[in-house]
Amino acid sequence: MAEKEDISVELIYIKPGSQNRLTLKLAQGSNINQAINRSGVLSHFPEIDLKVNKVGVFSKIQPLDTLLCEGDRIEIYRPLEADPKEARRRRAKNK
């Protein structure tokens, strides 16, 4: 039986003033949760709570058990600071 090949994925977490990007080598069949835990990003950014922060692959929200493919880009999203609709209303009102 042949061994599973490794895949390469990218993990991104963006905060105001910094963009954090890691490239990871994982076993084929790894999921988002495994990638995030292996990356060490949770210890560097304790504000990330995977029960609160949504995650996605190429801008599409995905559950943590989503299997990854070669070249996937995992994104950890921060909660919105303001409702986008309300922000647009305020900008329109001020014009």
Image: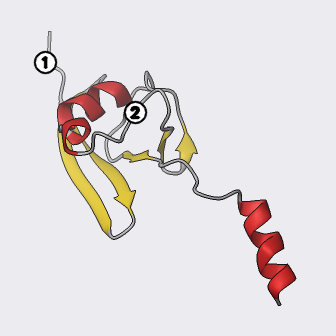
Residue 38 marker: none
Tell me if residue 31 can be seen: no
Q: Position of residue 9 (x, y in %)?
A: 28, 44
Cα–Cα gap, marks 1 and 2:
34 Å
Residue 46, located in which quarter of the rendered image? Answer: top left
* Vertical side of 77 occupied by 35: above or below: above
Q: Position of residue 63 (x, y in %)?
A: 51, 27
**Circle 2 Cα neighbour tier, 10 Å, few/some/many (<14 / 14–19 / ≥20):** few
Q: Residue at x 70, y 56 (%)?
A: 83
Q: Residue at x 57, y 44 (%)?
A: 60
The mark closer to the camera, 1 or 2, is: 2
Label 1 sits on what residue type? Glu
Image quarter of the N terminus: top left
* Vertical side of 83 occupied by 36: above or below: above
According to the image, label 1 marks what residue? 3
Residue 41, located in which quarter of the rendered image? Answer: top left
* Vertical side of 86 occupied by 75: above or below: above
According to the image, label 2 marks what residue? 49
Q: Is residue 69 left or right of residue 2?
A: right
